[in-house]
Amino acid sequence: MLDLFSTPPRSGKPRDIGVSHIMDKGLGLRQVEDLLATCSGYIDIVKLGWGTGYVTQNVADKIKAYREAGIPVCFGGTLLEVAILQGRFDAFRGMVRDFGVSHVEISNGVIDLTMKEKAKYIRELAKEFTVLSEVGSKDSEKIIPPYRWVELIQSDLDAGAWKVICEARESGTVGLYFGSGEVRAGLIDEIVAKIDPADLIFEAPQRAQQCYMVRKLGSEVNLGNIATTDVIGLETLRLGLRADTMSQFHEVEKWNRKRDVELEAELPHPERRSRVGAGATAATPPKPRRHLSKIG
């Protein structure tokens, strides 16, 4: 990254805050290499989405490429749900170990696990892996009240989860968001009132959702389900280098007010204007060009 402008501070890697959790939906090895060459410094965790890691050819080579770039990988939580459903938990854990994967995601977005059951799996996995748990249903018809979100998140943290991922799916239309993609602002307010945002990863696949989270919780908010094509775009949002968050991190309003004063000072003195009006012989001075209040 260039070093020319003053930008919000960003934690260095490995990060505990300001995490960008990226969704790999089946990239080829060459695509992974291009991604790492372009923006590896802005990727903190890669999730091999849902069950894609199970069917992707040469997945071991992909995992190795990420690992050599210092980026941990985890399989999608859906894969672990299938393992639990089929009684293959120990086999799944062995597979993860064999791939040299350090992080594991556990979710119950489809299967029904009680808090006690999920906590048991988290404690077991945390003995050898960094655990990310996921809270929230993938079913848009299933609405979880805010107090229940808080209970479920706290239970997972108490059981040993490193971070809890707040569900939104790849579409960004469930969990934290309405079906339209609009943020459930009241839900987020109630969650962060009880849970430290540093312990959470907010899924935000849509740019408007990323903007909302950065504006509300700052440049070091942990965000997940970020498309590989949005990694650099998200980093510009975090640094105020995109119009959506420029005013958040740079003194735009102060600069604009100062500029207004300067432009006003360039106008003819009121007395001169009155004399010009009385004589009606001088040309009317042109209006000063106004600045743009926003940079697109």
Image (cartoon, helix red, strand yellow):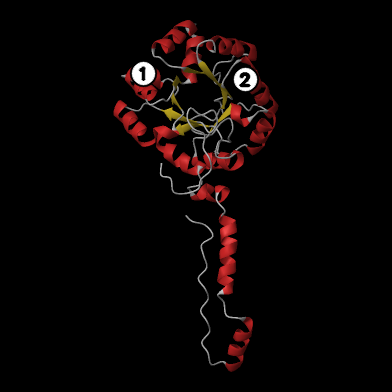
Residue 157 numbered tag:
2
Find disc 1 in the rendering and name its residue: 55
> Given the image, on which type of amino acid does mark 2 rest?
Leu
- Secondary structure under the numbered disc 2 in the rendered image: helix
Residue occupying image coordinates x 48% and y 6%: 90
The one of 77 and 154 positioned closer to us in this rendering: 154
Residue 182 showing in the rendered view: no
The residue under the point 53% across, 93% down is 281
In front: mark 2 or mark 1?
A: 2
Relative to 1, is 141 above or below? above
Disc 1 marks a residue whose amino acid type is: Val
Q: Count every numbered label the image shows and give the total.
A: 2
Relative to 67, does residue 230 appear above or below in the rendering? below
**Mark 1 element type:** helix
Question: Percent x, y for residue 205?
Answer: 49, 35
Query: Which x, y percent locates residue 227?
Result: 43, 34
Dividing the picture into quarters, in which one does residue 31 lie? top left
Where in the figure is residue 201, as x and y percent of width and height?
A: 55, 29
Question: Which numbered tag is attached to residue 213?
Answer: none
Nearer-the-camera pick, 1 or 55: 1
- In the rendered image, the quadrant that contains the N terminus is top left
Can you say whether 266 is above or below 104 in the image?
below
Label 2 environment density (alpha carbons within 10 Å; few <14, some 14–19, many ≥20)? many
Q: Disc 2, disc 1: CB below 8 Å?
A: no
Q: CA distance from mark 2 to mark 1?
A: 31 Å
Query: What residue occupies the far front of the structure in this picture?
Result: 3
x and y, in percent, of residue 83 in the image: 48, 11
Is residue 72 among what the camera can see?
yes
Q: Is residue 215 above or below residue 46?
A: below
* Earlier residue among tags 2 and 1: 1
Query: Which residue is most to the left?
Result: 30
Mark 1: few/some/many CA within 10 Å (<14, 14-19, 20+): few
